[in-house]
Every structure is written in C-alpha cells, then in structure tokens.
Image (cartoon, helix red, strand yellow):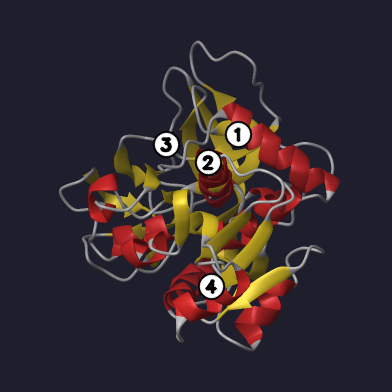
C-alpha cells in the first residue's frame, strides 16, 4: 500500500510502498479515505519523540483517520465490515499510522462511527485536534459568561477550541496576527471573538478587554508562564504543550496539563456537533496522499486550521 513514511528521524516524510497491516485481536482494519496532518506528526518527523516512544521503521505517520471497516480482528464486537468509522491511532509505539491506504486501530479507544451528516473528509481531520480542544475546555470547566483566552487560536486545536468555548457562552479572546489570521479566527463562529496580536504587547491588549484578568486560558501555543500571569486570582489554565503547576509557583492559579483522550464518548460528542453544523471542522486545504509531503511543508510554514489528506 502507499503510505507517508520515515526511514529514520529526523527526516522529511516521503510517500513509499509498504506492506498493508493486518488486524490483530481487538482491532479493525480500516480502509482510510481521509486523514490530516497534526503537530504530533510533525514532531515525530523532526525527531522530537525519540526516547519517548518506540519507533518502528519504516514508520508510517498519521494519527487521524476516517474510512470504512475492511476487516475485524478476533474478539471485536460492535463493529462490522462496511461500517464508516473515524478516530485516532492510539498505539503505544510509532510506526503503523493513518497517512496510508489502510490502518489498524484498537476498538478499545480511538474509534467511533461517522454519523449521518458528517463528511468523511471532515471526520478525518477531527479526531486528535477535536479531542485536545474539548478536553482543554472541559479541564478549565468553562461556563457561560466567563472570559477565556485561547492562545494558538489559528491552529487546528485552537480553531475548534474557539468554537467550543463560544458555544458555552464564554467571552472569547483569541491570539492571531492582524489580517488573514484574524479574519480566519473571527469567521469561526457567529459569536463575537476579541482578537489580540501575540506579536505585540499581549498583556496590555488582554487587560483592555479583561482588566481584572481572564477566568481561563487555553495554552495551545506561546509562553505558558506569561499567559498564566493574565489570569485573575483563582483562574485556570489548560495546557496541551506541557505547562505544569511548578512553572507558575507563586501564582494563585490552577494548571491543568492536558493529554488528548480520544475516547468513544469524546469522539461521538464531537462528531454529533460537527454533523449538526454546531461545530465546523476548520479544514483550509486538502492534499492527495501523493502530495502529503507538501502538506507537511505547509504545516511547518504556519498554515491555518487543519490540512486534510485524502488517502483513497
């Protein structure tokens, strides 16, 4: 099968021919229709995960997937051949990813049905970023009327988090450069979004909107300690990039370190919102599998939202 692979790390992803996987007990073999590029994939190619996870070469990249069940492994219940599914590859090693024509995934976590009304192309870009966004919003227990600062609002996780926060009735402040980035962020939701330029005096801009400090911060990019300083006393910050409580000692704030958990419950909730139109999957460009290396280059250059890859 054709797949986006690495023969070593760090390296530039390439499209090559590899053996198609076979489902083990408790797994599905999915014929992949769509996937996407995530920061996790870029970090893998850059070699940042060496020593953190086992790498099996040739290493097939990719976390997100959407497609059709082609075969089921021993002991699988709840799924049959022909089911339309999506989710996130959650194996404890790197090597059998979803930027390929086929992928095997465990039914224990990371897979859910694609509901009617959700395009396969959108489902293939929703799993990992959506889980990280929803888990972050839940971690700070965001409620109606509160003010939240989303740092990193132009990426896939941030673009979804802006929408999820606004849907809860929160006042959203989002970081973006003026121009195309700001237009992208303000166009994500019908609710008003206050855009602040992270290349300028961020504190002054935020304090003009929330003089007493914001209630919550979603730390998806930027300096976490600096962002924590923009919280009101007792505020909460959720970080997907490793901020811990120790980094903000002396501050009266709570830090929640978030690792995306693509449970069936989370994936189903996201899919239902996307299918109903309440949540828009922010795909800004789509590449065929053979051009996936170009998608990685665009991601590294700071592309907005999600970059989808069609695999079949």
Q: Which mark is residue 266?
A: 1
Task: Give the Cα separation between the discs numbered 1 and 2.
Answer: 8 Å
Q: Where is mark 3, residue-wise?
A: 90
Element at badge 2? Answer: helix
Element at badge 4? Answer: helix
Query: Which badge, 3 or 2, is on the more N-terminal residue?
Result: 3
Q: Where is mark 4, residue-wise?
A: 207
Q: Quadrant of the C terminus?
A: bottom right
Residue 233 in the image: state x and y as whole percent.
44, 51
Front position in the image: 81 or 105: 105
Q: Residue at x 54, y 62 (%)?
A: 150
Front position in the image: 233 or 240: 233
Task: Give the Cα separation between the discs numbered 1 and 3.
Answer: 14 Å
Of discs 4 and 2, which sits in the foreground? 4
Q: Residue at x 60, y 13 (%)?
A: 77
Residue 105 in the image: state x and y as whole percent.
48, 32
Task: Give the Cα separation between the discs numbered 1 and 4.
Answer: 34 Å
Query: Which badge, 4 or 2, is on the more N-terminal residue?
Result: 2
């Amino acid at each position: 099968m054709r797949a986006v692979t690495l023969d070593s790390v760090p390296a530039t992803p390439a499209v090559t021919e590899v053996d198609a996987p076979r489902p083990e007990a408790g797994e599905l073999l999915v014929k992949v229709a769509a996937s996407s590029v995530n920061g996790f994939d870029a970090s893998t190619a850059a070699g940042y995960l060496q020593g953190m996870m086992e790498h099996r070469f040739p290493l097939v990249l990719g976390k997100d997937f959407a497609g059709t069940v082609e075969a089921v492994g021993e002991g699988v219940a709840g799924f049959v051949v022909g089911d339309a599914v999506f989710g996130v590859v959650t194996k404890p090693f790197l090597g059998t990813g979803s930027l390929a024509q086929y992928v095997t995934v465990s039914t224990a976590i990371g897979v859910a049905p694609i509901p009617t009304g959700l395009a396969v192309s959108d489902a293939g870009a929703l799993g990992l970023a959506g889980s990280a966004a929803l888990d972050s919003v839940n971690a700070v227990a965001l409620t109606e009327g509160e003010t939240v600062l989303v740092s990193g609002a132009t990426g896939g996780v941030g673009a979804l988090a802006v929408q999820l926060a606004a849907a809860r009735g929160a006042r959203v402040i989002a970081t973006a450069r003026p121009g195309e980035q700001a237009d992208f962020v303000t166009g994500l939701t019908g609710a008003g979004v206050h855009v602040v330029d992270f290349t300028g005096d961020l504190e002054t801009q935020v304090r003009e909107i929330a003089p007493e400090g914001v209630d919550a911060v979603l730390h998806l990019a930027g300096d976490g300690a600096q962002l924590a300083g923009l919280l009101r006393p007792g505020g909460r910050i959720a970080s997907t990039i490793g901020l811990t409580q120790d980094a903000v000692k002396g501050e009266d704030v709570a830090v929640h370190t978030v690792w995306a958990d693509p449970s069936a419950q989370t994936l189903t909730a996201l899919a239902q919102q996307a299918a109903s139109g309440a949540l828009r999957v922010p795909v800004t460009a789509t590449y065929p599998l053979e051009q996936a290396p170009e998608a990685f280059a665009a991601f590294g250059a700071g592309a907005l939202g999600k970059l989808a890859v069609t695999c079949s």
